Image (cartoon, grey):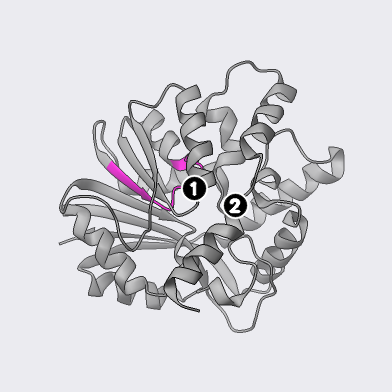
Amino acid sequence: MDSDARDRAVAAHYALTGLTAAIRGGLARLGDGAPTVDILGAVDEFHMGGRAATKALAEALGLQPGARVLDVGCGIGGTARWLAAHSGARVEGVDLTPEFVAVGRALTEEVGLAGQVNLQQGNALALPFEADSFDAAVLLHVGMNIADKAALFAGIAGVLRPGGRFAVYDVMRVGGGDFGFPQPWAGGPDVSFVETPAAYRAALAAAGLAPESEVDRRALALEMFAAMRARMAAGGPPPLGLHLVMGPDGPVKIANVVAALEAGVIAPVQIVARKG
């Protein structure tokens, strides 16, 4: 599969029709009036650990008000909006999936953050920004869809200012064995490129990004999925939740990823690096 076909397959995996309507329907069921960044956290943080993982990542970056931040693979913009609202950062988000960007723009407008958060469709391997223009960058559960991590990190390093920090939070291979598909990030192995933390560190270093810290958040992921299953068992799907962005085969994806986590094959790992 060539790179263009792979990009189309990745975008198709995440694409969902009617996502904006589904989220608005969930908000109506909650009956809390206009959406807020905090209310939307249940559905727009599409990564293991959810909002708790985003908060930990933000703390590791130490963002200051007014910082310019790049969110690579921003999805529907949950992390970008939270960073803007809670750190005062100005965030640019790029995502391959047009449907995600359209939903993200609508939600950003509704929570009043259009002046701080800009989301656009684009490719993580061809970032449309000037060199040395960001104070920080984040990448949450994106690298699993990109085979050439050296090129990915080189591109991100190019748009970071000297001394800028880059936080990666990806699903990584931490043990032997296989895992089943579909997974939340891929329907099959042709678009799944899970690598070890050592491979990530090597690719970061080759791009001039010196790793400073590394944290395995497998326990946080298992805690999140246990809570999700308990809520589902007690009362079915909540009005807002990741089931809305995972589509009809969401239960199978969750079962497969939990099995791989419990077997110690994969884990979400956070790595923070700094540009020299």
- Callout 2 touching callout 1 (CB < 8 Å): yes
Residue 134 is situated, as x and y percent measured from the top left of the image, at 22, 46
- Asked if residue 101 lies left or right of residue 129, the reply is right
Range shown magenta: 69-79
**Residue 98: image tag:** 1
Residue 111 or residue 102, whichever sits in front = 102
- Asked if residue 7 lies left or right of residue 238, the reply is left
Query: Distance from label 2 to label 1 (Cα)?
Result: 8 Å
Amino acid marked by disc 2:
Ala
Residue 16 or residue 205, whichever sits in front = 16
Q: Of helix, strand and loop, which one carries label 1?
A: helix
- Asked if residue 43 lies left or right of residue 194, the reply is right
- Asked if residue 166 lies left or right of residue 252, the reply is left
Q: Of helix, strand and loop, which one carries label 2?
A: loop
Q: Residue at x 30, y 66 (%)?
A: 153
Query: Badge 1: how crowded within 10 Å, few (<14), some, or many (20+)?
Result: some
Amino acid marked by disc 1:
Pro
Query: Badge 2: how crowded within 10 Å, few (<14), some, or many (20+)?
Result: some
Mark found first going from the N terminus, 2 or 1: 2
Q: Residue at x 67, y 26 (%)?
A: 27
Q: Is residue 147 above or below residue 108?
A: below
Task: Give the residue number, with chain letter if any, for mark 2.
Answer: 15
Q: Is residue 123 above or below residue 133?
A: below
Which residue is the extreme one toward the bottom?
176
- Residue 191 location, quadrant: bottom right
Q: Is residue 219 visible?
A: no
Q: Residue at x 64, y 40 (%)?
A: 19
Residue 100 is situated, as x and y percent measured from the top left of the image, at 52, 45
Residue 253 lies in the magenta-colored region: no
Q: In this view, does 163 lie above or below 3?
A: above
